[in-house]
Image (spheres, rainbow, N blue to C red):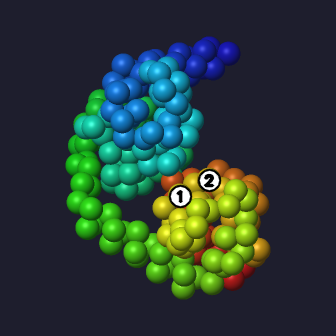
Amino acid sequence: MLKKITSWRASREAVQQARENFDPDFYAKSYPDAPKGAAAAFAHYLKKGWKLGYDPAPWFSTRAYLETYPDIRDAGLNPFVHYVSRGRAEKRPLPAPADTTADAEDSISAEMARVASSGYFDAEYYLERKPPLPAGTDPLRHFVERGWRDGRSPSYGFDIPYFDRLMGEKRQHAKNPILDFIDTGLEGR
């Protein structure tokens, strides 16, 4: 019982530290789809924002932290909460955010190429799903940039909610599920 109380207190203190370091104005300006108000924006980041790769403050890159520290990514921990509550104390260097648009575009292009060559993406199927995509939207690009994070399945043969249930705790939620599937070696089993 004492262990549960201690763990609960530590979690509560970690969230409080994250709240104190969270920049609601930056978050609101950077992500117009996020809820307005400091408390609502912070709750959004804790529940969904970090999984979407959103940054909680201009000095902290969620994606860079998860890429630099795969142990945090693989454990499914919120990177910002980890950094402010433990990462600093562990003397983990804060990775610099990848600011260059060219690097981001190269990364998106590389991911699009991997998804397209996987055989698990069906553009027609993807376009038929609800809600409909705006006219002229590249379905593959949409899937890579946002669709998989929204749980929008890429084809009849690859159902994201089913894959998440199948993988359980091993699922790397900060990673495209098709790439997670291929990289974990489950393909062909």
Mark 1 burial class by Cα count in 10 Å: few <14, some 14-19, many 20+: some
133 vs 79, nearest the viewer: 133
79 vs 89, nearest the viewer: 79
- What's the residue at 27%, 62% (across, down)? 101
Rendered view: 158 above or below 86: below
The residues bearing labels 1 and 2 have C-alpha atoms spaced at a distance of 6 Å
Q: Position of residue 18 (x, y in %)?
A: 40, 25
> Which quadrant of the rendered structure holds the C terminus?
bottom right
Q: Position of residue 14 (x, y in %)?
A: 44, 23
Q: Position of residue 132 (x, y in %)?
A: 68, 61
- What's the residue at 33%, 52% (across, down)? 64
| Residue pointed to by mark 1 | 146
Rendered view: 185 above or below 130: below
Left or right: 111 in relation to 84: right
60 vs 143, nearest the viewer: 143
Rendered view: 66 above or below 18: below
Left or right: 139 in relation to 63: right
- Kindly identify the amino acid type of the residue bearing the numbered disc 1: Arg
| Residue pointed to by mark 2 | 150
- What's the residue at 37%, 56% (across, down)? 67
- What's the residue at 23%, 49% (across, down)? 96
Give the secondary structure at mark 2: loop
> Which quadrant of the rendered structure holds the N terminus?
top right
Mark 2 burial class by Cα count in 10 Å: few <14, some 14-19, many 20+: few
Quick check: marks 1 and 2 in contact, CB under 8 Å? yes
Q: Position of residue 91 (x, y in %)?
A: 25, 37
Give the secondary structure at mark 1: helix
Residue 100 occupies quadrant: bottom left
